[in-house]
Image (cartoon, rainbow, N blue to C red):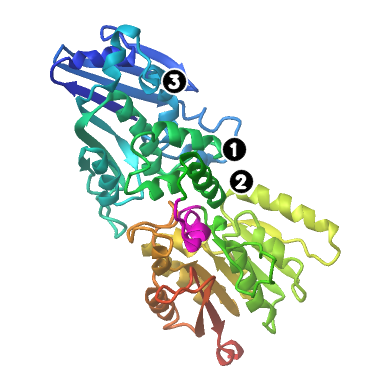
Amino acid sequence: MHITLKATGTHAGMISHLLAKNPYNTYDRTEKGARVRMVYTVFTEEEAEIVIQASPDSIDLVKNSPDSYDITQYINDREFVTSSLFCTYIRGSLGTALNGKPKEDYAGWVTHPFALELSFGPVASDLPDSVVEGLFAPLGYQVAIERGEADYSFQLKNRSTVRYVTLSGHQTVQYALRQLLLLIPVLDNYKHYYISEEEFDKLRRYGEGWLPEHPLRELIIRRTLRFTNLIEQFEQSDSAETGTQKHIEKHTQKHTVQAQNDKHKQIQQPEQPQEEGKQQPTVRLNELRYQAIMDVIRKLPRRQKIVDFGSGEGKLSARMARMTGIEEIWAVEPSAYAQVRAMERFAKLERHTDAIIPTPMMGSLFYYDEQLRGKDVMILCEVIEHVDEHRLNRVMKTIVTEYQPNVLIVTTPNREYNEVYRMNQQELRHGDHRFEWNRSEFQEQCEQWIEEAPYSVALKGIGEEIEGFGQPTQMAIFTRRKEQKEA
């Protein structure tokens, strides 16, 4: 992970004083568990180029974290990509330039716009190239993006999400670095630390002089703060500070962040009428999914044995544990960390005499398990979009021809609704989503899965419906035909 800062033209060498780094020495320090090095590859009065590079320890990245025992935590791109981690590592080394406080003799150069070229990468981003360009072009940069073709032997994707970005334009060193340290995490959309109101100060300091008027300001704030309550607090405090009341649409306030985050953090308003003078509490979209799934199960004549595939931390399984008529729940999940959290949640059910205790089980959709065959209900709640499309047909065939549940319930995002969240059509709601289907695509796939299987399917929506866009979540209920079961 690196940034290269290059200045050309008369007095280009002055950037060494703004950075407070001797061009004839190599800066080599350890910052927050990473080795940070800065070296001038070119230095004359008319051209100066400095490379800023960070090398984190892959073990330190997860040491003492609750995920440290899960081997998958070591198999990631964090030690290679230019991300929020990288910005954290180098921020201390660039303090003089970011604060604009060099030695007094050079203070006048802080506001001097140099002819700069900034290149950084690799950066892994779910944003399309057009949005990446739209983040930097309004700041006066020419944007060049390099991304290699991904050569797979099967149909997965033909373009890598990893890119190298080069920016060219006239800018002060202080503004250029502040813009990078704010926008690189926006591109990467990965946060390794707890997001709180402390981010407000970073947005104001690093965004001073350019963020308020940026055409993608809403996107920048949304991907920086992530959570609706923080966004609203920031907008309110920002309005109070500037004395101008910004217009925020009610619908955007409810939905703007959660569509791109974890599937369990989307917020919806309840659809029942509101008592006069009393404000209804918000209901998370995740909770609406659980309610919809349990409503279906309650109406089933047979619901004794249930499989919750991709059960995560066991939230849905724990809710179903107190439903009448259920005798066993298999909570199947491949993540060891999620299983531990689920077991902690299930242990708390022991205080309820009317609850059964779900059985946590390590398992995957890709491996057939005879124990799960012939159950009354099988659930895939927000699971299929995390499976590569080229593997999904085989997974579904295994379910309907081998597992053969009496009822199969599948939920997945509705891509059409992403426009309500003001998302670019090429964006996905979560970084791990491999695809998202619109309503007609989902219907077509459901019908295809049961072409040769004894099932019928009914489709429903979950969440607030918007005309022309449908509902944020779509649900399919597959029912095994009675005549086939008796045969």
The numbered mark at residue 69 is: 1
Disc 2 element:
helix
As drawn, 323 above or below 385 = below
Q: Quadrant of residue 45?
A: top left
Q: Quadrant of the C terminus?
A: bottom right
- In the image, what residue type sits under mark 3? Gly
Q: Is residue 321 left or right of residue 292?
A: right
Q: Earlier in the sequence, mark 3 or mark 1?
A: 1
Q: N-terminal of the two: label 2 or label 1? A: 1
How far apart are the two marked residues, 3 and 1, measured between alpha carbons? 30 Å
The CA distance from mark 2 to mark 1 is 8 Å
Q: Position of residue 224 (x, y in %)?
A: 45, 43
Of badges 2 and 3, nearer the viewer stands: 3
Magenta stretch contains residue 466: no
Q: Residues within 10 Å of mark 2 (few under 14, many from 20)?
A: some
Provide residue 382's location: percent of width, then percent of height: 52, 63
Secondary structure beneath dot 1 equals loop
Q: Which residues are magenta?
A: 246-261
Task: Return the x and y of residue 178 as percentages of the image width and height.
Answer: 36, 30
Total marks shown come to 3
Q: Is residue 104 above or below residue 148?
A: above
| Residue visible at 23% across and 13% down in the picture | 14
- Which of the pair 50/267 is nearer the observer? 267
Q: Which residue is mark 2?
A: 337
Q: Where is residue 180, by image quadrant?
A: top left
Look at mark 3 in the image and give the residue it sits on: 92
Residue at 61% of width from left, 50% of height from top?
Answer: 338
Q: Residues at badges 2 and 3 in contact (C-beta under 8 Å)?
A: no
